[in-house]
Amino acid sequence: MLRHSALLLLAALVASCGGGTDDGLVRVAHMGDAASLYATGPELSSGAQLLHAAQQQGLVRFNEAGEIVPGLAERWIVTDDGRSYIFRITEFDLPDGTRLTARAVADGLEKSIARVKGTSLALDLAKISEVRVMTGRVIEIRLRSPMPGFLHLIAQPELGVALAEGNAGPMLAEREGDATILAPIPPELRGQPQRSDWLELVDRVQLAPYAPRDAAQAFERGQVDLLLGGHLESLPLAITGALSRGTVRLDSAIGLFGLDVLRPEGFLANPANREALALAIDRPTLVEQFNLSGWTGSNRIVGAAMPGDDGSVGERWTALSLDQRRAEAASRVRQWQAESGSAPTVSVYLPEGPGSDYLFAALAEDLSSVGVALLRAADRDLADLALRDSVARYAGARWFLNQFNCAFAAPVCSADADYLVELSLDAADAAEEASYLAEAEQTLTATNLYIPLGTPIRWSQARAGVEGFSENGWAVHPLFPLSKAPI
């Protein structure tokens, strides 16, 4: 009965007019294709994460500011030792009329954890030792050792709970061609007090895939209210004209932005030569043509001041000027050229887009200054280098190091570093854990199989009057807040 009522309500919301926009519909364009938006693999694209999080929330979820708010759990506590998280499940009826139970949530969570096996997310979850049902409405998650970013980790869309009794929201969805219309589930169907004015308060949200150039044009013409999924390669499409410039919203995200050495052969077979490329790059000016205030260049793998970072690893080559670094790099290039009889040529794969064109030109100029010719590869599989561009799921040194695990990142990895990260999981205390992680970073850095450039760049465009959107360090922009649902 409740399932039938919920579907009727969704139909009413899809056809209704809501509060904020003229027709009660917030039109969201996500840059990417339909296949990516509707993907269902163990690790989701950013667009698929939006849809998944809207329909299958986990114990906790993100709000528009990237903060943790209740999901299926109405509240939680953390034990003093940081090794146990206890969640009280919200009490409400599922679409088939059955009551939501801790057992159903725990089973769904364990299935989600099993589904991501073999991915970097599974490594992030390695601190979980047990998911235990304590009572009909209480779940305990026990950890092998404390993890400060644990709530951000379990808020990931891939860990949303799929229930046999039906999706628990917070939104219901109906696909229309390549687009999807989403409506917030009324509070009384989510264990909250009823609101008689619900239909007048909330908006529906339409999410549709767009090619980057088409998305920018649609925004300029007023056909969409919010544009999501912007990366560096598409940024020049947004920053054209005074009117557009004021709507560009940049996330100060943490994560990885650098070059993977995919083929450590020829000139790149030697770690010292790979380091020569890193020495030659002028990071502070690398993206200056984009006028990005606050963008941080770095030659470290792990972001600065992360939990699990004991401060023993810092930026490299701080005692050398750029000219001195390039002199050292040029010396290594000349030595290799004398031994091989030819000047080194390296190819790089970058995503298609005008921003990548700018980045390639800057990198080519930097490497040319030390005698290395950089070519643009059309096929990633044939390139020597490729851009790695990913936002962290949580703040922690272990996330950065897990991205380079040999189980899926070879050849950009170190088995010794992986071993040290594994040891950190059962460290006796936080200091020992940080020591293992610092040694792992140093070990991985010494391979020079990854050339850090800085922090990832994410951008959006929001029209004036759009509520429920905010820049944040996780670059997460959930759909539910866009509906203006008060609870």
Image (tube, rainbow, N blue to C red):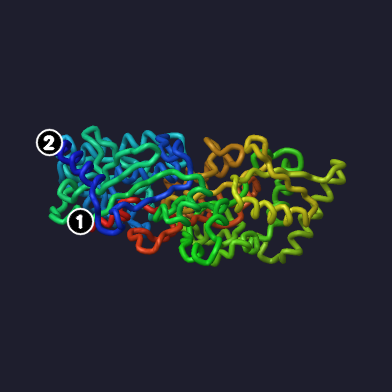
- Whether residue 392 is visible here, answered yes or no, is no
In screen coordinates, is 274 left or right of 16? right
Q: Which quadrant would residue 105 be assigned to in this image?
A: top left
User: Label 1 neighbourhood size at 10 Å, few (<14), some (14-19), many (20+)?
Assistant: some
In screen coordinates, is 303 left or right of 472? right
Q: Residue at x 36, y 43 (%)?
A: 51
Picture disc at residue 1: 2
Residue 78 location in percent, x, y? 28, 54
The kind of residue tagged 2 is Met
Residue in front for this viewpoint, 265 or 460: 460
Mark in the foreground, 1 or 2? 1
Q: Residue at x 50, y 59 (%)?
A: 310
Picture disc at residue 357: none
The kind of residue tagged 1 is Glu
Residue 332 location in percent, x, y? 79, 51
Q: Rounded to the nearest whole Å, what is the CA distance between mark 1 and mark 2?
A: 24 Å
Q: Residue at x 57, y 47 (%)?
A: 388
- Whether residue 50 is visible here, answered yes or no, is yes
Q: Residue at x 34, y 51 (%)?
A: 479
Picture disc at residue 200: 1
Please report contact status of discs 1 and 2: CB closer than 8 Å, yes or no.
no
Residue in front for this viewpoint, 449 or 93: 93
Residue 55 location in percent, x, y? 30, 42
User: Label 2 neighbourhood size at 10 Å, few (<14), some (14-19), many (20+)?
Assistant: few
Dot 1 or dot 2, earlier in sequence:
2
Q: Secondary structure at mark 1?
A: helix
Residue 110 to residue 313: above or below: above
